[in-house]
Image (spheres, helix red, strand yellow):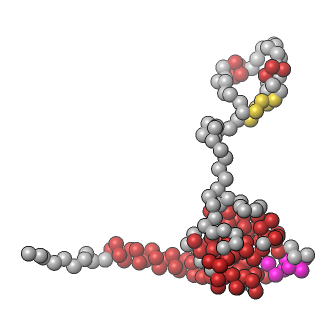
Amino acid sequence: MQQHPSVEHAEIVEPVISFPPNSMIGSNSTVEPVTSYLPNSQVGRPPYVGKPWSTGLFDFHLNQTNAIMTAFLPWVTFGQIAEVLDHGETTCPLGTFMYLAMLPGFCSFWIIGSKYRKKLRTRFGLVEAPYQDFVSHMIFPFCSLCQEFRELQYMGFDPALGWNGILAHQQQAIQNQNEQSNGPPPVQEMSR
């Protein structure tokens, strides 16, 4: 049998997985192994898992105001987080309502909480630890919300300010930086 011309001149690349094994394919066979390849940059390198969280799941004592707020009104904390992660498209009151709407359904608020936790992890390249997202929100919902709130603060997005407050804060920082770089030169004195 004649092989396809592109197969005759193809460069041989060592496969990561090959099925069926090459020993089962005869020299006269038209069967080609099904192979999956890793990009050259991935060969011999462990997969990227993500960077660690700035604080632990149970470090709620690091922001006591948020811990108390979350203990009594977790839906407000969720609303603040949702507003920041959605760039203001989901307002804090809407996020609060979404969380509250999930409460009567067999305490299914963990479903929406874990989705936003995954969104946070994806945006900042964080590892899914110490538990999977849905486990964190199912078993430790208040601790999870506090950790997400603190993480956004450490990343420079304080959920307590709201999305518009964050934008105003960033704009003020840029304006201050421009004033410092465009300001008059410092006063110089002559010395003897």
**Residue shown at 76%/17% (left/top)?**
3
Can residue 10 be spotted in the picture? yes
Left of 106 or right of it: where is 48? Answer: left
**Residue shown at 72%/33% (left/top)?**
16
**Residue shown at 40%/74% (left/top)?**
177
State whether residue 175 is above or below residue 2.
below
State whether residue 132 is above or below residue 63.
above
Can residue 159 be spotted in the picture? no
Which is more toward the observer, 94 or 56? 56
Picture coordinates of residue 157, whole percent (x, y)? 58, 74
Q: Locate the C terminus by quadrant.
A: bottom left
Picture coordinates of residue 89, whole percent (x, y)? 68, 75
Residue 102 covered by magenta stretch: yes
Report the span colored magenta: 99-105
> What residue occupies the far right of the structure in this picture?
106
Which is more toward the observer, 183 or 140? 140
> What residue occupies the far left of the structure in this picture?
192
Picture coordinates of residue 104, whole percent (x, y)? 89, 80
| Count of numbered tags | 0
Which is more toward the observer, 140 or 1? 140
Residue 116 covered by magenta stretch: no
**Residue shown at 64%/85% (left/top)?**
65
Which is more toward the observer, 62 or 7? 62
Quadrant of the image occupied by residue 62: bottom right
Q: Locate the N terminus by quadrant.
A: top right
